[in-house]
Image (spheres, rainbow, N blue to C red):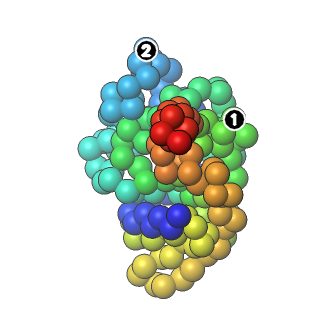
């Protein structure tokens, strides 16, 4: 299942925690669109109005550290982010991102080389990140097919619903 995502880079540093991704005062909802309006506002106040569908968050080490809330990847998804490229992730954020269908890619080399505004093309199946301006290519370990299916379905709940429907029609 080949999937290509194209967008511009929004670059952040190390240890971006879930309170920065979505401040706690907005956790009264799980609606991705509402959460997306407040995504990253502590670092970039107008982020939600400037981010374009498909754009990427690019960060350093330990992205998504802090509270174990699924609201953080939901907010990124609701803001329109096409995914996150980071050197490493907090374990619970990594799992929550998959559960809500937010594509995430671990690639330390890319996270160091990509600059704010670079246009990126990510091939989720082959595990490549291409900086379209320079043509530089970075490699990451793609997800196994079953995880790629979960992300492509929009998360674990939609994936299970689709699977149950498929089983009914057999």
Question: Badge 2: few (under 14), some or many (20 or more) residues near its Cα, within 10 Å?
Answer: few
Q: Secondary structure at mark 1?
A: helix
Question: In this image, 131 relative to 92: left or right?
Answer: left
Q: Are marks 2 and 1 in contact (CB under 8 Å)?
A: no
Q: Which dot marks residue 115?
A: none
List the single residue furthest toward the front. Answer: 170
Q: Is residue 143 left or right of residue 41?
A: right
In the depicted structure, whether residue 156 falls above or below residue 138? above
**Is residue 72 something that shows in the picture?**
no
Residue 110 in the image: x percent, y percent?
60, 69
Q: Residue at x 63, y 50 (%)?
A: 147
Q: Quadrant of residue 138?
A: bottom right
Circle count: 2
Q: Quadrant of residue 28?
A: top left
Badge 1: residue crowd in 10 Å (few <14, some 14–19, many ≥20): some
Please give the name of the residue rendered at 73% of the width and 40% of the height, measured from the top-left corner.
Answer: 91
State the image coordinates of residue 98 (x, y, percent, origin top left): 59, 43
Depicted 10 relative to depicted 49: above or below: below
Distance from disc 2 to disc 1, alpha carbons, whole Å, reads 20 Å
| Residue displayed at 49% across by 51% down | 152
Q: Tell me, yes or no, if residue 165 can be seen here.
A: yes
Label 2 element class: loop
Relative to 121, does residue 156 appear above or below in the rendering?
above
62, above or below 66, in the image: below
Residue tagged 2? 28
């Amino acid at each position: 299942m080949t999937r290509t995502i194209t967008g511009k880079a929004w670059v952040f540093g190390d240890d971006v925690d879930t309170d920065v991704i979505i401040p706690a005062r907005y956790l009264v909802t799980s609606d991705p669109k509402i959460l997306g309006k407040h995504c990253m506002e502590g670092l970039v106040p107008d982020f939600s109005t400037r981010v374009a569908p498909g754009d990427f968050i690019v960060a350093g080490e330990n992205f998504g550290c802090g509270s174990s809330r699924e609201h953080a990847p939901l907010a990124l998804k609701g803001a329109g982010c096409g995914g996150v490229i980071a050197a490493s992730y907090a374990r619970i954020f990594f799992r929550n991102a998959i559960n809500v269908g937010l594509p995430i890619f671990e690639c330390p080399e890319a996270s160091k080389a990509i600059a704010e505004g670079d246009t990126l093309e990510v091939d989720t199946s082959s595990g490549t990140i291409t900086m379209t301006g320079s043509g530089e290519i970075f490699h990451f370990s793609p997800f196994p097919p079953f995880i790629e299916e979960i992300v492509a379905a929009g998360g674990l709940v939609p994936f299970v619903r689709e699977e149950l429907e498929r089983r009914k029609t057999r």
